[in-house]
Amino acid sequence: GAVVSQHPSRVICKSGTSVKIECRSLDFQATTMFWYRQFPKQSLMLMATSNEGSKATYEQGVEKDKFLINHASLTLSTLTVTSAHPEDSSFYICSALAGGENQYFGPGTRLLVL
Amino acid sequence: KQEVTQIPAALSVPEGENLVLNCSFTDSAIYNLQWFRQDPGKGLTSLLLIQSSQREQTSGRLNASLDKSSGRSTLYIAASQPGDSATYLCAVRGQAGTALIFGKGTTLSVSS
């Protein structure tokens, strides 16, 4: 089956720094990728939809200047958390869409901001 | 705006029991529905995908049904095992090419 990877799997950073998370579709091309955030004991909340070669579409309440998304190729999307603060600590999961209906998920990145 | 609700939020059963997890969604105009499993601190494992035109899907001890008109789906787990302990997430897709919208999940604990 299709595989989606994320890097890093875990990151700890100081408040005020920026963190970049990479999401790659390893064996298929994905024109559309999604970024979700999951707080402890909560469900996955959609943050944004990323389309290759165009600007990402953000969900209501998600700051586009804080969560920068770049989908530069058909196999790579990146999420940069700018000027991270402790409240940004969360589990970030990306997923890639294959064939319009099969959504494959990465293993997630756990971010801890001190 | 689509909302997905899962009941119960948590469930504890002894090994061997058959159980049913419930999922409801507010907008019945869905493209498909998917059930996932998530172990603590881990990513998602897809269990079953049901297209809007289908009524059910089966995989091993798992059976998922879909009643689109009433906005409901159930996940049936037969002969539960301790290894089934995890959080089960229901998610719906409104249209082809759009993101899955998730419920909050049901956390299942199966004791031996």
Image (cartoon, coloured by chain):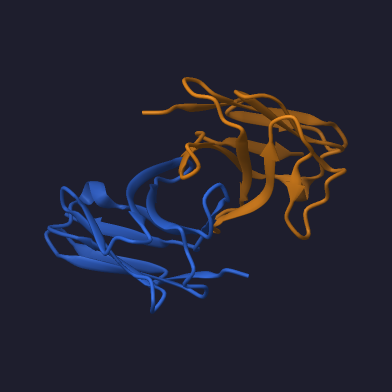
State the residue at coordinates (51%, 34%).
Answer: A106
Q: Which chain is blue?
A: B
* Horizontal arrangement in the rendering, residue B7 relative to residue A22 (left or right): left
Number of marks: 0
Q: Position of residue B62 (x, y in %)?
A: 21, 54
Which is nearer the eye, B5 or B94? B94
State the residue at coordinates (36%, 56%).
Answer: B51
The N terminus of chain B, quarter of image: bottom right
Residue A23 lies in what quarter of the image? top right
Q: Which chain is orange?
A: A
Q: Is residue A35 above or below residue A39?
A: above
Q: Position of residue A3 (x, y in %)?
A: 45, 27
Residue B33 lies in what quarter of the image? bottom left
Q: Residue furthest bottom?
A: B70
Which is nearer the eye, B89 or A10? B89
State the residue at coordinates (49%, 63%).
Answer: B103
Q: Position of residue B89 (x, y in %)?
A: 42, 57
Q: Position of residue B87 (x, y in %)?
A: 39, 55
* Horizontal arrangement in the rendering, residue B20 relative to residue A53 (left or right): left
The C terminus of chain B, quarter of image: bottom left
